[in-house]
């Protein structure tokens, strides 16, 4: 080298070479929480007129709104103690809850909410709109059994996986048996430039989850995602 690089230049070169890519969030504050909740509820009612924000889902929606806006006052739940704890704006989202409590709707509603202000995020050095497609995990297994390909789900910058735990534990393609979601989540957990969003009937720390996906995935998800629970009865009835 003709000259010594300073620290900033060294880190820039590392980033340009695709090493240690990161996530950077931008603050979209101040904003009015009451108005934001009204907008979110209106979006939800477009899909189902019975949708409402109440005491069973308010904490989740308020903090999903803070997450979208890059508000460092965001909170989540400790999956082990269930206590409220500070959230991580650079991590994704994991929403657990019983069938019909509105977990899947939450991610779909918030995807629509992001488009209202064209929320931006920097992923791996590239600024892009914060938005995500949603896929049921059983449908992803069908893709693998048909094509043997999973790169789309491993490499997407932002992606939502709906109903984790409802898919078959093994999927077969050309004689190869694979726990599809375990491989996808392990792969995404090793990266620092992707955001993963998940809904599931299973709490991260429960024995059934660990039995299905292993300790490594459970440990990764604690770092990858802010944890929420939406409780209550089946809202579809």
Image (cartoon, helix red, strand yellow):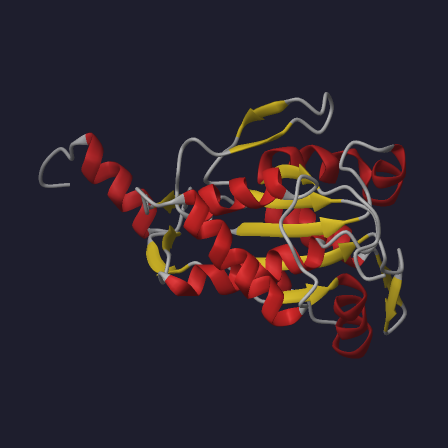
Left or right side of 135 for 43: left
* Tally of marks: 0
Closest to the observer, 111 or 193: 111
Residue 62 in the image, given as x and y percentages of width and height: 53, 42
Left or right side of 73 for 146: right
Q: Residue at x 84, y 33 (%)?
A: 206
Left or right side of 139 for 25: left
Closest to the observer, 72 or 137: 72
Residue 130 in the image, given as x and y percentages of width and height: 43, 58
Q: Is residue 117 above or below residue 12?
A: below
Closest to the observer, 167 or 69: 69
Rendering quarter of residue 7: top left
Most distant residue in the bottom direction: 146
Q: Is residue 131 above or below residue 60?
A: below
Residue 87 in the image, given as x and y percentages of width and height: 52, 32
Residue 190 visible in the current orientation? no
Q: Residue at x 90, y 70 (%)?
A: 175
């Amino acid at each position: 080298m003709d000259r010594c690089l300073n620290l900033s230049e060294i880190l820039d070169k590392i980033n340009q070479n695709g090493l240690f890519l990161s996530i950077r969030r931008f603050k979209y504050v101040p904003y009015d929480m009451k108005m934001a909740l009204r907008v979110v509820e209106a979006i939800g009612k477009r899909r189902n007129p019975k949708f409402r924000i109440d005491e069973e889902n308010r904490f989740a929606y308020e903090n999903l709104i803070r997450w979208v806006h890059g508000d460092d006052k965001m909170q989540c739940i400790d999956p082990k103690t269930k206590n409220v704890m500070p959230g991580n704006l650079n991590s994704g989202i994991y929403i657990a809850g019983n069938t019909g409590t509105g977990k899947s709707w939450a991610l779909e509603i918030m995807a629509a909410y992001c488009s209202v202000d064209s929320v931006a995020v920097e992923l791996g050095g590239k600024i892009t709109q914060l938005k995500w497609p949603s896929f049921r995990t059983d449908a992803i297994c069908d893709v693998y059994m048909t094509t043997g390909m999973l790169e789309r789900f491993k490499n997407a910058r932002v992606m939502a996986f709906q109903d984790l735990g409802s898919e078959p534990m093994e999927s077969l393609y050309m004689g190869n048996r694979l726990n599809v979601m375990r491989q996808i989540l392990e792969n995404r957990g090793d990266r620092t430039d992707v955001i993963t969003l998940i809904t599931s009937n299973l709490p991260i720390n429960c024995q059934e989850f660990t039995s299905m996906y292993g300790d490594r995935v459970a440990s990764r998800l604690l770092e990858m995602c802010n944890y929420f629970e939406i409780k209550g009865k089946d809202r579809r009835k």
